Image (tube, rainbow, N blue to C red):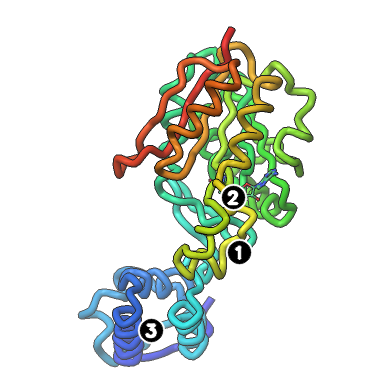
Amino acid sequence: MVVARITGRELWAWRNWAIDLARGSGVAKREVDWLLQSVADLDRLTLRLESIADNRSIEMAIPLDRLSTLWLDRIEHHHPVQYLVGKTFWRDFELVVSPAVLIPRPETESIIDIAIDSSTSAQQQGIWVDLGTGSGAIAIGLAKTLPAASIYAVDCSPAALAIARLNANQLDVTDRIQFSHSNWWSSLAPLQGKVAGMLANPPYIPSQEVLQLQPEVVKHEPHLALDGGIDGLDAMRILVDTAPEYLQPGGIWLVEMMAGQGAAVTDLLTRQGCYTNIQIIDDLAGLDRFVCARLRG
Ligand SMILES: C[S@@+](CC[C@H](N)C(=O)[O-])C[C@H]1O[C@@H](n2cnc3c(N)ncnc32)[C@H](O)[C@@H]1O
């Protein structure tokens, strides 16, 4: 929808102003073009320098002063650009995000590939659970890669679940995922003993460290998604202790953790006694990021 027209020269001047602010604040320059493409509805061609530095009329989906307000929000108040544009890219799809959900991170993308690589074809046709679904990223990733699986996704935040359902709807996988409001497994009692794979990216940052994260994270992302208690392992302990009741024998327990927590999570799994094949798996940056185990039996 066209709501404003400006000249190429005005757009050029605005972009330079925004890039200068970005440089001064350590924000990536590509975010300026992302905002222009996503919110102002400009295409890449229009943004090519030679086509905007002239007097041609350019159609915009929002007025330039509104765009400036958004950019100042980004720079001065550290609003993540993903919340400003209302979306992010994850694996091969686009997800709606709002401050009700954690912005899904690129490092989490590998959890889907690890799940596929770790499972048998029979398991891939079974029941999979995404605990703490947030935007729905993991559940939707599973739905797209495991066409025969039944997928359940839960979160204790109703606002996050609303975003997850919206994403599933937009990506046409609503009929593949059953979402429910739940404190971890609490709404999933009928699945006891039947789950082929449990995936989770739980809150795992030690409480003291949450406040020292980048301002974009501390000020705007939901602390419910971040804060893992004193040592960061509160949710891990629950997931280690509760999953054996729900997993099938041989079922997969696959969880993202903070780099450096591998030994502690391995210890929790070992001491619980029901798990075997405990493996720490690095992310693409070479950091210990995932723990995968199987229920004995
Ligand atoms: C780190 S975020 C992960 C979101 C998403 N899975 C992702 O990878 O982007 C953790 C999620 O766990 C949810 N959560 C926290 N405590 C929970 C609980 N007791 N039961 C269910 N979900 C919980 C939070 O609301 C949040 O959406």
In percent of width and height, residue 42 lies at: 40, 74
Label 2's element? loop
Number of marks drawn: 3
Q: Which residue is mark 3?
A: 58
Q: Looking at the picture, does residue 189 appear above or below residue 287?
A: above
Which mark is drawn over residue 230? Answer: 2
- Amino acid under disc 3: Ile
Q: Earlier in the sequence, mark 1 or mark 3?
A: 3
Q: Is residue 72 visible?
A: yes
Residue farthest to the top, as pictured: 297
Label 3's element? strand
Residue 200 placement: quadrant: top right
Q: Looking at the picture, does residue 123 appear above or below residue 162?
A: above
Report how far apart the C-alphas of labels 1 and 3 lie in the structure: 31 Å
* Residue closest to the eye, 191 or 242: 242
Callout 2 touching callout 1 (CB < 8 Å): no
Q: Earlier in the sequence, mark 2 or mark 3?
A: 3
Q: Quadrant of the C terminus?
A: top right
Which mark is drawn over residue 99? Answer: 1
Q: Earlier in the sequence, mark 2 or mark 1?
A: 1
Which mark is drawn over residue 162? Answer: none
In percent of width and height, residue 126 lies at: 61, 19
Residue density around tag 3, few if under 14, some if 14–19, many if 20 or more, within 10 Å: some
Q: Is residue 50 left or right of residue 276?
A: left
In percent of width and height, residue 218 lies at: 53, 66
